[in-house]
Image: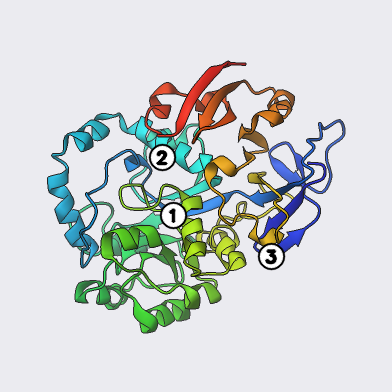
Amino acid sequence: MRGAASLTAHGVSRHAPAVSGARFAARPPHGAVEIDLRGQIVVPGLINAHEHLQVNCVPPLPGGVVFPNSYAWIDAFQAHFEHPGVKAALAVPKAIRLRHGALKNLLAGTTCVVHHDPWHDVLDAHDFPVGLLRNHGWSYALGGPAYGPPVQQSYAATPPDRPWIIHLAEGSDATARGELDALDALGCLGANSVLVHGVGLGEEGMARVVARGAAVVWCPASNRNLLGTTLDPRALVAAGRLALGSDSRLSGARDLLDEMCGVRERDELPAAALLGTVTTDAARIFGLATHGTLDEGVGADFMVVADRGAAAVSALEGVRRADLRAVVRGGLPRIADPDLAHWFDAAGIDTVTVTLDGRPKLVDARLADPAVMALEAGFERSGKVH
């Protein structure tokens, strides 16, 4: 990757790492084809810390209703299941919907996803578009309908060096505010506990989370859409105990880049701290040692953005998915601007010409499944395989 700068949560370098096979290397292997990326910045592939991959094509509830907690939202959604659009979306085979959720993430530079739902065979497919958190424990929530593994049993069965994930304190009422105490009373608040949403934690609750070595996943767009409020992320991010998730489009942002843009527009976190929540901090919280960095020896998952002449630390400021010059996973380009066609050629990858939010792109032909593309607004085939 000749001529590119690089940006991580640790700072800026005027030299991007080399790629050898599927991993980053100190120098290109003998005979490697160099890609000229002068005027570009390489950024680690993003980690989406909370997703429900299979429901990104399901129409959300009509806007304007604020719920006191997630259980009230779940109750309201039961009637929404009778909506024709919801029925049609859920009639699409789950394997296709899971691939669609993964494609949504990849198009926005996310190369690793924490999927908070039961496992499915398609997630093990060798050509699944994104990497996934594996070998972790999870439960859905403390209350509400029975769904997913029981709380105490799943926590006890999770090795202490692997993350255990649960929706918690998702609301602003007494029910949500009391959930941290309830979880602690069950003996399930430990250093590997990852609490999703945490809106009702308050300052004291967040301090207890940090003291226990636990962590929180923040999904601000989903929180605001459903609950009308969200948490103050500053204490958690200062302790390195915060990761960012987009949730699904059922309640949250279109994708993780859009979520990040919203955080910066509201000036809720500095750019460097925000990048940490989707790279190094998220990797540490979830034990994803091979993600979130550009370090030698780790998987070569990254995205390329244009150097717009501003401070490189703000390279992702205002960047949406169509602005990305390329998204690379496992050392191979998956989607890129047409002037980088030689990158696909050098890797021996067949491509399809598409438009992404109106902009021409080339995409790995294996990602251009018509059934999956049909679910993704703004992503349309415009040419043949070549």
Residue drawn at 50 percent across, 71 percent down: 241
Q: Which of disc 2 and disc 3 is earlier in sequence?
A: 3
Q: Are marks 3 and 2 in contact (CB under 8 Å)?
A: no
Residue drawn at 22 percent across, 74 percent down: 173
Circle 3 is placed at which residue position? 10
* Residue 316 found in image quarter: bottom right
**380, 136: nearer the viewer:** 380
Residue 205: give x, y in percent of width and height: 36, 80
Q: In the displayed structure, would residue 101 be above or below residue 282?
A: above
Q: Nearer the viewer, mark 3 or mark 1?
A: 3
Question: Can the viewer see residue 141?
Answer: no
Q: Residue furthest right?
A: 30
Circle 2 is placed at which residue position? 101
Residue drawn at 73 percent across, 55 percent down: 309
Residue 186: give x, y in percent of width and height: 28, 73
Residue 22: give x, y in percent of width and height: 68, 38
Circle 1 is placed at which residue position? 136
